Image (cartoon, rainbow, N blue to C red):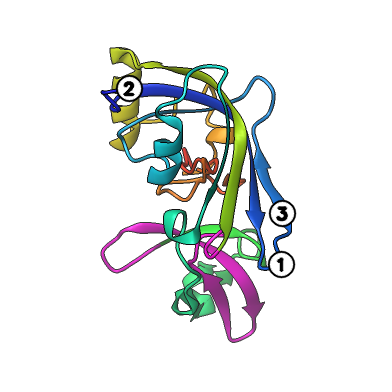
Amino acid sequence: MDNQQNKYISVSYQLHSIDAEGKKHLEEQTQQGNPFQFISGFGVTLDAFEKQLIGLAPADKFDFTLQPSEAFGEYDSEGVHKLSRDVFSINGHFDHENIFEGAVITLMDADEKRFMARVTKVEDDGVTVDTNHPLAGSTLQFTGVVLENRDATNEEIQHMLNHLSGEGCGCGCDDCEGGCGHDHHHHDDGCGCGHDHHHHEDGCGCGHCHH
């Protein structure tokens, strides 16, 4: 395909992470009737993921592996922070309902930029959060089949533009769930993901309607 922009691509896939011993772990998979859909050229999926799919035709199967440098980078220990419990208090009361070990939360930095973090520990003297993507440091294997690969319609492109400007889901999915996941995002922290996220808030094609 000469023109790799504005292609509407729909895929059914499984995503496995591969550990240091070569063992595979299923991270996410699309459900029947709910494929992962995106429009190329908008940066809503991992560049390497999009590059692998852009030249495939409907019914083509794929099986490719992305190294951490092509996916979510190496794990960064400096991405782990211990914050005061006051940060998570509402009217003087700690938010136990939403802040617990394993919870994925949205935080805001000094520039009012939002980012995702995972709560790893809740203690009396603070809350530890990890801002690394859940799959940082992981080698990823995507296997699946292309369902659609065609020029996106003007309506679909406008829908994507609306999403990128904060006016709704732009992933082409019907309900912003499933493979679209994730802001897997994205990259909004999805993967193919998007997560979502699996949920990585982003399906892991890694565009995340997010997630």
Residue 36 — which label?
Answer: none
Q: Indicate the position of residue 23 as horizontal and vertical percent values.
A: 73, 59
Amino acid type of the residue tagged 1 in the rendering? Glu
Start and end of the magenta stretch? 108-137
Residue under label 1, please give it: 21
Q: Quadrant of residue 171?
A: top left
Q: Is residue 160 above or below residue 92?
A: above
* Element assignment for label 2: loop
Q: Residues within 10 Å of mark 2 (few under 14, many from 20)?
A: few
Which is nearer the N-term, disc 3 or disc 2?
2
Q: Element type at marker 1?
A: loop
For the point 26% across and 23% down, which residue is it? 3
Residue type at numbered disc 2? Met
Residue annotated with mark 3: 24
Residue pictured at 31% horizontal, 21% vertical: 157
Front-lying residue, 49 or 160 = 49
| Mark 3 residue type | Lys
- Can residue 34 be seen in this snapshot? yes
Q: Is residue 1 above or below residue 122?
A: above
Residue 1 - label? 2
Q: Is residue 192 magenta?
A: no
Task: Answer with left or right where residue 73 lies relative to residue 101.
Answer: left
Question: Could you tell me how far apart the alpha carbons at marks 1 and 3 are, in whole angstroms?
Answer: 9 Å
Image x and y of residue 40, in percent: 35, 30
